[in-house]
């Protein structure tokens, strides 16, 4: 990866969410929780490095493909059962980020986990992701 892109992705990860006005305050809360889950998942491994493009891929996917659809569903249908799942979403994302990063680290080809490593890992562990309990994806 070219150094310029490395810096761009690092900046995108750190500033994600600051350039738009979220519809609800909970969205900012989830963004913070998702970023922290990714950071914590990486921190749990000694000397493991994740490239900014890989961290950004996880962030965008967990935010755009899980938390936003679930929050919108709960608001639209006032579904108390799904509202309870929102409370579990933190743990699902934390567990899934760890599982994906762990799997990516086992098969990584370079010194850092790349977005390609993340995509390969997701395909390997998809059926075991905690987020599948929410039934957003099929």
Image: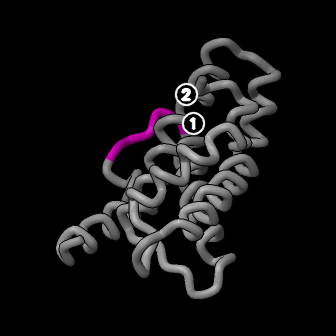
Q: Above or below — where is 12 with respect to 122?
A: below
Q: What is the magenta range?
A: 20-24
Q: Are marks 2 and 1 in contact (CB under 8 Å)?
A: yes
Mark 2 lies on residue: 69
- Image quadrant where one finds the N terminus: bottom left
Residue 59 visible at all: no
Q: Quadrant of the C terminus?
A: top right
Looking at the image, residue 85 sits to the left or right of residue 13; the answer is right
Judge whether residue 68 can be spotted in this image. yes
Horizontal side, residue 25 vs residue 40: left or right? left
119, above or below 112, in the image:
above
Task: Determine crowd level at label 1: few under 14, some 14-19, many 20+ residues with C-alpha closer than 10 A.
Answer: many
Q: Position of residue 119 (x, y in %)?
A: 45, 50
Q: Position of residue 116 (x, y in %)?
A: 39, 57
In reply to whether residue 66 is colored magenta, the answer given is no
Indicate the secondary structure of the residue bearing disc 1. helix
Mark 2 vs mark 1, CA separation in Å: 6 Å
Rendered view: 71 above or below 18:
above
Task: Please give the name of the residue rendered at 75% of the width and 51% of the height, measured from the top-left corner.
Answer: 91
For this view, does 133 lie left or right of residue 18? right
* Residue lying at the far bottom of the rendered structure: 47
The local secondary structure at tag 2 comes to helix
Q: Is residue 21 magenta?
A: yes
Q: Is residue 62 left or right of residue 125?
A: left
Q: Which of the 4 quarters of the picture holds residue 132?
A: top right
Which residue is label 1 attached to?
66
Magenta stretch, main secondary structure, is: loop
Q: Residues within 10 Å of mark 2 (few under 14, many from 20)?
A: few
């Amino acid at each position: 990866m070219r150094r310029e892109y490395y810096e761009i992705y690092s900046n995108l990860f750190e500033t994600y969410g600051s350039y738009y006005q979220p519809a609800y305050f909970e969205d900012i809360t989830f963004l913070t929780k998702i970023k922290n889950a990714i950071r914590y998942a990486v921190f749990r491994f000694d000397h493991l490095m994740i490239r900014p493009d890989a961290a950004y891929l996880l962030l965008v996917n967990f935010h755009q493909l899980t938390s936003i659809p679930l929050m919108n569903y709960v608001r639209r249908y006032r579904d108390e059962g799904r509202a309870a799942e929102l409370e579990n979403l933190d743990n699902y994302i934390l567990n899934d980020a760890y599982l994906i990063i762990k799997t990516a680290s086992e098969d990584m080809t370079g010194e850092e986990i790349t977005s390609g490593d993340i995509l390969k890992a997701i395909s390997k562990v998809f059926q075991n992701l905690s987020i599948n309990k929410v039934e957003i994806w099929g």
